[in-house]
Each structure stands twice: as C-alpha cells, then as structure tokens.
Amino acid sequence: MSEHDPSETDVEPMRLFDTARGEVVPFTPGPTVTIYTCGITPYDATHVGHAAIYLTYDVLQRRLRDRGHDTRVVRNVTDVDDDILRKARELGVHYLDLAAAETARFDDDMRALDLLPSWSEPRATSAIPDIRGFIGMVLDRGYAYQAGGGVYFDVSKFERFGQVSHLDRDEMLRLAAERGGNPDDPHKHDPLDFVLWQPSAADEPSWESLWGPGRPGWHVECSALALRELGTTIDLHGGGTDLIFPHHECEAAQSEAATGEPFVRHWLHQAMVRMDGEKMSKSLGNLVFVSELRKLWDPRAVRLGVIAHHYRVPWEWTGDIMPEAADRLARWRAAASGDGNGDAALDAVRAALDDDLDVPTAIAAIDEAAELDKGVTRAAALLGVDLTRE
C-alpha cells in the first residue's frame, strides 16, 4: 500500500488526459491499479527520451500509492523484432546476447534514477506460447487471415479501428510506412492490415506454429503479455506519443477482437523529447544517454532535469538543463537538512500531481518552500527525489 496515509483531501479523483477521448478526465481506478507501459527494444543504451517516458509513469505510480492504491505495472522487453535483429546482424552477435547486455544497462540506469521496480518485466521471447494462443483467438473470431506463410489482422472487420488515434486513412498510411507498418506488403488485403505472425528470414529466430514456422509481428506481444499478466481490461496503458499509431491502435484492435471486451480504460502518452529540433531517437542519432549523464551529475539531478517538463508538452534538450537541475537539488537538500518530517509543499505537490500530473507546478511549489528554508523531504520524495541520501 502507500508510503503515506492518504490525506483527507484525497476525496477528489485524479484527473489525467486520455488520448482516446482527447480531454482531461477523472481517473478512478479500484484499489489495485493495473498499468501497462511499452518497454524498450534493447539494442542500444537508454537515452533521455526513454527516461522521460518511464519517469512519468513512475511519478504517477508514486502518487497512486500515496493515495492508498496498490499498483501493478507491467513493462515488457521486446527482445525479438526487426530492429534488434538488424543490430545483432550488424554487430555479429546473437540477438539474445545483445538484448541481455542492453537490458542490464537499461536496468542499471533506471535503478540509478530511483525508478520503482515494475511488478513484472516479461520478455517477448518468454511469451511465444501465449502469442500463438492469442493469434488463434483472433483467427477464431474472424478478425484475421492467413497469407504468404503469415497471419494478418483484417482492419476492415474491426469497426472501431482508429478509436485511439482518431487519424484519417491517409495519415494512418503515412505513419504506417514511416514506422515499420509495411503498407506495401503484397500479402495484405488492405495496406493498413498488420502482421500477427510472419515467416522468419534464414538468419532469424523461428518458432513452430499452426501457420508455419516464423516469429511474432511487432504489435502482438504487448496484447498477449497484457492479457497474460493483467487480464482482459487494464486501467491505464502508456508509452511515447510515437506509439499511438500504429502500435497502440493495433494493440487495441487485436485485443478487443480476441476477447470481445474493452482493452484499456485510460490511454496516457508521453510527449517526445527533441534535440537539435528533431525527436530524440536512435535512428537519427541525436541522443543524450542516461549512462553518460550519470558520470557527470548526481542521478537525482538527472531525474529532476527530465521531470521538470509537463509530460504532454514536447521539449528540447539543452545545455542549461543539467546545471539548473543540479542547483535545484542543492537548494532542496539545504532546506531538507535537519527538517524532521519535512512536510512543506506536500499538499501543493499532491494537488499538482492530481491535476494531470503537473510536475512543473509541483516543482515550483517545492522551490518556493525551499527558498523559505522549509523542509521539503516528503514533497520531493513524492517526485522520486530522495533528499536523505548523501
């Protein structure tokens, strides 16, 4: 349960922006909150864009626990897909060795940033039987077809396709081509149909199935893992905004096709972090790695530098961020010294987080209390910043 007893002001529900509904709405889960966040494809080091995503859901989880909820956060590891197989081929290493090394580096970065441990961190390769069973459910319900040795989801059979992203067909086709959806695949009935199971290339891993040897498509692992780990309907699903389409749109379609039940009650997405005017991404190479920042700065300052931006607003990484964050950490620590419980700004931070995870306002409240030399230990802890540690 929570680290602190929920305050008497916790009568009003949290309010969070829901991507599918396009507005800030009450978030009213039960005593146990189920959350699925799309994890890494471990073929390179963790960059600040990754950190922004996982720290947002970490702050959310901390506030939910503070309000008295239990939380069950599942974050998958995509240890088999086109990207990791391509990188392993380039490096001349086994794809699982690459995945293990990069996952270990990611875990080390997240521990340094004081990320709460996930309730479960399943790997895609651990779920092949679940994935095959899930695909069988989709086929049995008439939402998929076999072609070219693979299995494809038929978007024409699912009337709610578009319910998460609300994009028109032309924009969907553009993003599908840009983000690995392969709309030109000749085996597809419709360019927007997507792969559930695909034949493996000669040098790729392969598993037996009723549809022939092959491997899972990109989207199917998250649906199978969410169903296995959290059940038919989950309270909140998230990731970066670049996953809204096609990944989350396809997840929602195939999951609801398979079970006949709603997949996600609330969709929450983290805006992109930019550098040099472009989205920070591995493909562009404009990256700032967490492991490198940790060599120069206190990890708590790294955390503060990343969370100082509202999760729904895209922002630019600049050279001013870390010096400002380090200075902020020093001021908070000075105010925290010998402060006992350090309850200053706690109610203001709680209120800000309940208002669509407004971390910048929460930080401003702590700044103000620290300027008055008031202890802010508990308020900082709610943002995941431990001021008691040397």
Image: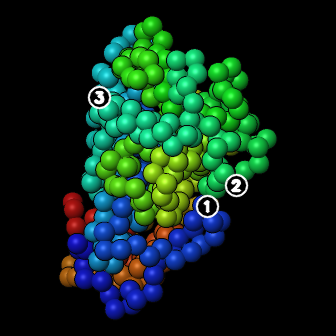
The circle drawn on residue 20 is 1
Residue appearing at x 29%, y 28% in the figure: 100
Q: Earlier in the sequence, mark 1 or mark 2?
A: 1
Q: How many marks?
A: 3
Amino acid carrying mark 1 in the image: Ala
Q: Residues within 10 Å of mark 3 (few under 14, many from 20)?
A: some
Question: In this view of the protein, which residue sits in the foreground, 385 or 49?
Answer: 49
| Color encoding of the figure | rainbow
Secondary structure beneath dot 1 equals: loop
Residue drawn where x is 39% and y is 23% of the image: 209
Measured in 3D between alpha carbons, the distance from the residue under mark 1 to the one under mark 2, in whole angstroms, is 8 Å
Work out how far the residue at label 1 is from the one at label 3, CA to CA, in angstroms: 34 Å
Q: Which mark is residue 362?
A: none
Can residue 32 be spotted in the picture?
A: yes
Instruction: Please state which amino acid type lies under the numbered disc 2.
Output: His
- Check whether the beta carbons of the residues at disc 1 and disc 2 lie within 8 A of each other: yes
Callout 2 touching callout 3 (CB < 8 Å): no
Marks 2 and 3, how far apart at CA: 37 Å
Mark 2 or 3 closer to N-term? 3
Q: Residue at x 76, y 43 (%)?
A: 169
